[in-house]
Structure formats: structure tokens, C-alpha cells
Amino acid sequence: MGECTHNCSTCSSSDCKDRKNDLLAPMNSESNIKKVYAVVSGKGGVGKSMVTSLLAVAESRLGKKVAVLDADITGPSIPKAFGITELATTSDNLINPIVTSTGIKLMSMNCLLEDATGPVIWRGPVIAGAIKQFWTDVRWGDVDTMFVDCPPGTGDVPLTVFQSFPIAGIVIVTTPQDLVSMIVEKAVKMAEMMNVPIIALVENMSYMLCPDCGKKLYPFGESDLETLAKKHNIKNTFRLPIDAILRQHVDTGLIEFYKGIKADDIVKILN
């Protein structure tokens, strides 16, 4: 890197502390968020939003003040998992987040749409702007831990989140298939390029338990999760099973009352 001119708008460096601080979106005076973690994936369909919801619930059960920012503007899933159907309100030019039955604060595009099934047909820059507004224009109040549910891939939204939010680290969600693992490496390398710490690699739908004998079955085959983690110096790996009861809780908006698979071990490393 050459001599710094302190003109961040023309700088191409991704590891400059001054540039990172310059790109951070300002927070309003009625919000105080201590730590922000992003949940990302290389591709869709791996259960990223479900993992985000489990993390939020586990952190809340520790007595923490928790918030979830649903950054998947075109495919929001978080309100459904928490049974949220009401729309967000505004006051004094700020948006009030929806508060779940156990006190978790949420903001999602579906909290602003009259028709939850209506498509959001926006181009990347408009979506990026909406993500920033969820940070700057929402009255979050005091929050210990915020989880940002990013859409899959390495496009505009993850880039906006990594640059505009003070991300303490990310959790990458994958599944056992080799194709998914290959694509996950793209997300890993993006995080490395952006100098964003990778907190954990979570393999969802890793196995299922036989209902008769309790033996672990691997419908997608056993993966080499640890090798991928070692290759990229990711210290923490977790495997989550397939659970039909969890699926039912998510589909019916009762994720906060699910008692099966827990994300306790994952949130321990966040605190």
C-alpha cells in the first residue's frame, strides 16, 4: 500500500482502519448496540436464517438483550420463524423494531410490507441503501448482541454489511454436500479479503438420529468439515442435525419455544 492520502473515497485498500471507519454507517442517538455478528452462507437453502434464529434465541436465554436485523431484503425469513405478522411503526422519524414474545427485537423488510408475499424488485444499490437504513433509522435501544441475517452469496448485501456495520465476526453456515463446501470457500475468502473475523463454521443438516436406535445417519454423506476449517484457520466448527420438530417450530413461528437443537455452544464463543 502506498502513502495514505486520507481520501478514503479514492482508496482501494481493504485493510485500512481509517477507510473502514469512514465507511461505517452512523447509528442514531437512540440506539446502542455492543456487538454485531453476521450470519452468512455461500449459497441458499442451507438453513442460514434458521441458524440465525437459533443463535438469537440461545443468546436471549442467557439474559442478553438481543436483536436480529434481517438483511435478506428480497427473501426475508426471520419474521416467519418468530411468528411476526404485524407491521413496524414509526415515531419521531425513526422506525420502531418489532419485539417478539421473549423480548428479541426484529427488523425485516416483511415488517414494512402490507403483503408479506409481495416481491421486492429492487436493484442492488437500492437494496444496499435499505440495509443501511435498517441500521441508521431503527430505534434499536440498548442491545447486547445483534445478529445480521445476510442473503446467500458474496454480492452487494454482504459487502454492504461488512463495510457499513461494526462487525465483530461472522458465522458461516454450510451443508455436507461437496458443491456447497466449494461455494462456501468463496464466502470464507471474501471474509478474509475484508478482514472480517470468522467466528465459526456451522454445518447444518449434518446428520439425523435414527428414531429407533439413536444412531447417527448421514443422508448427504459425511463431510470433511474440519479439513475446510483447518485450511482457512477457522478454530470453531459445529454440526447441527436434521430435526423435523425444529422445522415445525420455524414454520409455525414458535422458534423461541423450541427445546431440541440448541446453539448454546456456538453463542458461548461469542461472549
Image (cartoon, grey):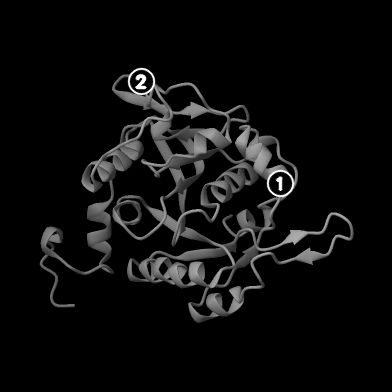
The structure residue drawn at horizontal position 57% and vertical position 47%, both measured from the top left corner, is 50
Image position, residue 136 (x, y; %): 31, 37
Residue 163, quarter of picture: bottom left
Residue 247, quarter of picture: top right
Q: Comparing marks 1 and 2, which lies closer to the viewer? A: 1
Q: Is residue 115 above or below residue 228?
A: above
> What is the CA distance from the residue labelled 1 to the residue labelled 2?
37 Å
Q: Nearer the viewer, residue 269 or 175?
A: 175
Q: Is residue 23 left or right of residue 185?
A: left
The structure residue drawn at horizontal position 13% and vertical position 58%, both measured from the top left corner, is 9
Name the mark on residue 90.
2
Query: Mark 1 — residue?
Result: 244
Q: Nearer the viewer, residue 145 or 95?
A: 95
The structure residue drawn at horizontal position 57% and vertical position 37%, both measured from the top left corner, is 81
Considering the numbered disc 2 on the image, is that residue within a helix, a strand or a loop?
Answer: strand
Q: Is residue 205 left or right of residue 196?
A: right
Quadrant in the picture for the N terminus: bottom left
Counting every numbered tag in the picture gives 2
Sequence-first tag of 1 and 2: 2
Can residue 31 be seen here? The reply is yes
- Among all residues in the image, which is located at the extreme front? 219
Q: Rate crowding at label 2 as few (under 14), some (14 to 19) or many (20 or more) other CA atoms within 10 Å.
A: few
The structure residue drawn at horizontal position 25% and vertical position 67%, both measured from the top left corner, is 16
Q: Amino acid at mark 1?
A: Ala
Q: Is residue 230 left or right of residue 192?
A: right
Can residue 62 be seen here? The reply is no
Considering the numbered disc 1 on the image, is that residue within a helix, a strand or a loop?
Answer: helix
Q: Amino acid at mark 2?
A: Thr
Image position, residue 14 (x, y; %): 26, 67
Image position, residue 264 (x, y; %): 68, 53
Image position, residue 65 (x, y; %): 56, 38
Q: Is residue 107 above or below residue 200?
A: above
